[in-house]
Each structure stands twice: as C-alpha cells, then as structure tokens.
Amino acid sequence: MAFKAWLVYRWRQICASCVVVCAVLCTGNVVGWSVEVSRIMEDPTTNFNLTQDDQQWLVSCAGVVAIFTTAGSGVLVEAIGPCRLLSFVLLPATVGWVLMAASNSLPWIYVGRIITGGVGFMLTTVVQPLLAEMCTADVRGLLSTLPEMMVSVGMLLVYVLARFLDWESTTLICGILLFPVTVGVLFIPESPYWLLKKGKEKMALRALMKLRAPEHDVDAELSTIRDAINQQNQHASIVQQFKALKEPCNYRPVLLVTAIFILRELGGAMVIFMYAVFFFENAGVTLDPFTCSVLLGVCRLVFTLISATIIDKLGRRPLLITSSIICGIALFVTGGVLYTQDQGVGWVPLTAVMVYVASFGLGAGPVPWILLGELLPTPVRSLGASIVTSIFVITLFTIAQVFPDLTVAIGLENAIMVFGSFEILLALLAFLFLPETRGRTLEDLQHAFVGSPVLTPFSHAGRDGYTPAYGSTFPSTSQGLEKVR
C-alpha cells in the first residue's frame, strides 16, 4: 500500500522521465554497434575489405563529430529548450541507422556512423540535466540512473542481435526503434527551469502541473525555482554563462565532474565495451567472444538496475568510491593472469571482467552521469554539461583510437594494468573532493562549492547529514546563505 501511494504521487514525472530516457537507447546502440565491425570483417559476403585501420576508425569515428555536437549542445539547449532539441535530433539519428543498413559502400557506413555517433553522445548531454530539472529530490537519484540503464539496454540489444543476426538487420532495428521515441518526446513538457529563464512563467507552471501530482504545491515549487534563478542571475545567455564560469562556486564543480569523467574513461570502461570481441579474443578466453559480449551486456544491465534501487539509500559518493576500487582490483587481476600466459586459466579473465562490469554498473557507470545533472550549478548547467561531455567524448575517441596500437606497443596486460591504476585514482579523487548530493535540492546544491577551500577533507564532518569534501561546503544556516550572496 505504501508503494502504491508513493507511485500515485510520482507517476507523472516517472513516465515523463522514462520517455525522455528512451532517447539514450541510441547512445547504447552506438557503443554496442562496435562489435559489428568484427562481424563485418568476418562476413565473406561483404565487399568492404576492412583493414585494421578501418576497424579502429569505425569504432572511434562515432566520437569525431560528437566532440562538436556535445560542445555545441549547450548553445542549442539555451536557444530552443532541451525537450524540443531532443525531438529535432532524433530524426537524423534514425536516418543515419537506416543509411548504414541500406548501404553497400564503406564511405556511407562511415557517414552513418558519424551521424549516429554525433547525435548519440549529444543526447546524454541533454537528457541528464533535463532529468535533474524535471524530477523532485526524493526520486532524482532513482530516475537519474535511467540513462545509464538505457545505455546498457542499447548495448545489450546490439550484442544479442549481433550474436544471431547479420549486421544489416541489427543496424536497421536500431533505427526503427527510434521512431516511437521521436514521437513520444513531442508530448513531454519542456523543462520548467528553461521556461522560467526565458520568462515564460505560465508555461513553466503548466509544465510543473503536468509533471507533479494534483496535490503537489506547484506554486511553491515555481516560486523556489524563480527565487533561485533571480538570486543567481540565471537568465544568463551562453556568453554570460562563460563569464559566470569564472566564479569559483561555478568552475569548481565543472572541473570536478570533468576530472571524474576523464578518469572513468581512462579506467578502460568504453574500451572493454566497444572492443569487447577484440578484447576477449586477445585475452585467451575460450568461450565464443560474441557470447562473452552478451554476458557482459547482461551483467552491466542487471547491476545498473540494482544501482537504481540503492543509490538513493546509500548515496552517490560511497557507491562511486567502492565501485572504482573494485574495478581497479578486477583489472589488476586480469592483467596479472595475462602476465602468466597460463592457457589453463582462461576463465579467470572472463570472471574478472564480469566483476569489473558488475562493479561499473553499480557505481562508476551511473554516478558520474547523475553528478552531471546534480552538481553543475544552474547558472552554468547548459555550458558546463557541454564542456564536460565534449571532454568526455574527446577522451573516449582518443582511447578508442589508440587502444589497438597501445596493446601492440606495451601488451594487453600492461594496458589493463594502466587502466586499473586510473580506477584507483578515480576512487581517491571521489574520496577527497566529492560531496554527497543525495536528498539535496538543485537550489541547495548550487551552494555546494561556495566559500574558501577547507584545509582538510574532514573538517566539516556531520554538518546536516552532508558528507563533506575538500574544497566544498554547504552553508548550514540562512545567515550563511546571506553571506554567500
């Protein structure tokens, strides 16, 4: 009965969030489709004659245009609104998938891959902050894990289809699935934050009424959002957001979230997911590599689902720290086994990688994306999200491009050890600098990095249930907030 009452009060924002999140299915498809490159190379009926360089570029070129689309997404969000932008970009992504499936020419495969990659990675830049602005604090953690969950679904879908279908059918299905999503997004109300920043107060009120239960005090929430916007001059254009980024309370969280994403990718996550077949073939795993890829996708999805159920109870910070440590240990074990070159323990790398993927799904996968929506201050949220995701895509593109050459230069085992080291660095960064955001409103989180850096990571322990971090403090009283202002 308690769950029914909880659902009745929140079902509107849950349904709206689910529709928006379905757009990110394209991102998972883009990442998962990399395994199809190996399928194309093995297919004797194709006339592509792929080389090793083609394999690297087909895997990594999805990030080339994405560097520019993610960097420019902030400008587009501010200009036309996040929901409207989603409806505009999903159609070109659909066309890109169909183009790849219908083409018999390698250059057109590249074109389709670039289009879908550019849109796919851009979607994460738009969706995550949008969810943070649509949802109330009590369900924001749960609903903010949905994009990572949908990425996992998209990857798993491609892995399963690649196991049983030819690459053309798999690619066409990826495009067809985006049609209903494109239509569904048209019925989702625009972000009330964006509407208020544009001076459209009546539309913002109607948006909140569509997202909240009838008994919810939408006038009070609208007033809170309006006050926060007015106090921080959050009507700012992109040019003004660049100026606002000079403020320590604005650039500190952007730098922190950017560093988290960089270390997350240097930890080898997307390399394992995008080069899954290549990885398992070279790690001495005896099981069919496409079957291993399906197991990998299932494992990530299951543990991302588990993360969604516990993240609002345990918090973001402990999950990220624990997850990163376990990921690092799993990679060290994998690298150590490869060093021994013992063919009789081929099951160990597979087991260790599954442990890595499970831990990644619990914390290191979803938490950075949640922080993208929660920690970036509203005055620079669009610009900050663009900066973070564009740097993320640059890092992803670079690693995906150099990984095969890196394994040749230093060996797969050494490359895995390097990835494990970066996972430990990520845990250390989160331990020292990351504040806990669980249960905090977006208005409250705007003050998370206000004030002078503290001298030690533990000097404000226990304040209002807030887990402190080096360089970040929450004002604990109204007087403190007035001093900040």
Image (cartoon, grey):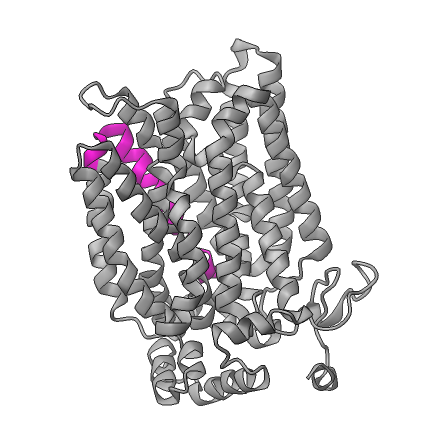
In the depicted view, which residue is nearer to us: 71 or 155? 71
| 80 lies left or right of 135 | left
| Residue at left offset 19%, top offset 43% | 99
Does 114 lie within the magenta span?
Answer: no
Location of residue 50 in the rendering, given as x and y in whole percent from the top left corner: 30, 24
Task: Magenta stretch: give its range.
Answer: 142-169
Front-most of 482 and 8?
482
* 144 in the magenta segment: yes
Residue 313: % across, % down = 57, 59
Q: Position of residue 258 (x, y in %)?
A: 58, 54
In percent of width and height, residue 380 lies at 54, 70
Give above or below for 85 relative to 303: below
Q: Quadrant of residue 89?
A: bottom left
Q: Is residue 4 visible?
A: no
Q: Write down the quadrant of residue 159 in the picture.
A: top left
Q: Main secondary structure of the magenta part?
A: helix
Which residue sits at x=49%, y=54%? 389
Residue 248, image quadrant: bottom right
- For the point 32% across and 63% down, the residue is 86
Point out the image quarter for the C terminus: bottom right
Residue at the spot x=47%, y=44% of the render? 303
